[in-house]
Image (tube, rainbow, N blue to C red):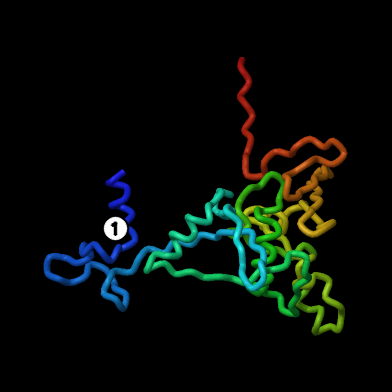
Amino acid sequence: MRRAKALGDLARTQTALDLHTTGTGTTARSEDADGLPVAREVVLHAHLDASLAGDTTVFGPTGRLEERQRLVLLDQVRAWCSDSRTKVTIKPVIDLNTQLATDAYAVPDRIREQVVLRDKTCVFPWCTRPARRCDVDHVIPHDPDAEAEGRPQPGPTQTDNLAALCRFHHRLKTHSAWRYEMVAPGIYEWTSPHGYRYRRDRDGTTAIDDARPPDRPDVVRIPRPRRR
C-alpha cells in the first residue's frame, strides 16, 4: 500500500516531494511555471446527476465514468479536483432531445459531443467500441454538390442524421452493401448484404424477423481440410 501511494505521489509530481531534479540540479523533463515537471495528462469523463435547490447545485452521491462504464463516487471527484495540479474542465449540459444542425459538412464539437452522449458506443450491430473513439457518420450521405446545383441537401449535418461508427464499421458501411437508418433518436435498423435486419439501441442488438446473427465481418473463416 505504501508503495502504491508513493507511486501515485510521483505520478502527480506532488509538491511535497523534491524528487523531480537530477543530481546537477537541472530538471529531467520540461517544466511548468512552478518549476515542477509537466504532469502526465489523464482525461476522465465523469457524469453526475445534479439538481437545483434554490441557487445551490446539489450533486448526487454517485456518478458514472465513460471509461469502461464504471461508477464513481462524488468524494472521489472532489479529491481529484482538490489536487493543486489538477486541471478541471466543466462543460455545459447538452440536451439530447435538442436538434442541432450546421450547414457545413464537418461536424462541430458541440454536435459531436451530443452524438457521443446519445449513442455511447459504435452503433453497428454488436460493436462495443466507445463512441468517443469513433467517427461521426452521416446516415444519409452528404452531397457536396447539392448547394452549387441548387438542390436541397439530402444528407444534412444535423443530429437526426448523424451516428457514431468506429473506423472499421464506418468503412464497411461506406464500401459494402451494409445499410442502416435511424428510426428514432439513438435507435437504428441495419440491413446486411444478405437481407437480414437488426435493431440497435442503447440496450444492445436484436434481430428483426428472427434473423440469425451474421458472421463477424472482420473474421475470415478458413474451411478445414478434408481427411482422406
Rendering coords of residue 33 (x, y %): 31, 78
Rendering coords of residue 115 (x, y %): 69, 63
* SS assignment at label 1: helix
**Which quadrant: the N terminus?**
top left
Task: Decide if residue 141 is in sight here.
Answer: no
Viewer-nearest residue: 88 or 73: 73
Viewer-nearest residue: 87 or 187: 87
Q: Which residue is outermost to the front?
A: 54
Q: Quadrant of residue 54?
A: bottom right
**Which quadrant: the C terminus?**
top right
Residue in view at x 71 percent, y 53 percent:
123
Residue in view at x 82 percent, y 57 percent:
181
Residue ID for mark 1: 10
**Residue kind at label 1, given as amino acid type:** Leu
Residue in view at x 79 percent, y 35 percent:
212
Viewer-nearest residue: 219 or 189: 189
Rendering coords of residue 179 (x, y %): 79, 54
Q: Is residue 197 left or right of residue 108?
A: right
Q: Which residue is outermost to the left?
A: 24
Residue 154's place in the image compared with 1, above or below, is below
Viewer-nearest residue: 75 or 35: 75
Q: Is residue 65 left or right of residue 94?
A: left
Task: Decide if residue 115 is in sight here.
Answer: yes
Residue 197's place in the image compared with 176, above or below, is above
Rendering coords of residue 93 (x, y %): 66, 69
Crowd rating for badge 1 (residues with CA inside 10 Å; few <14, some 14–19, many 20+):
some
Residue in view at x 80 percent, y 40 percent:
207
Q: Is residue 121 left or right of residue 208?
A: left
Q: Is residue 103 left or right of residue 46?
A: right
Residue 222's place in the image compared with 176, above or below, is above
How many numbered marks have been drawn onto this rendered protein structure?
1
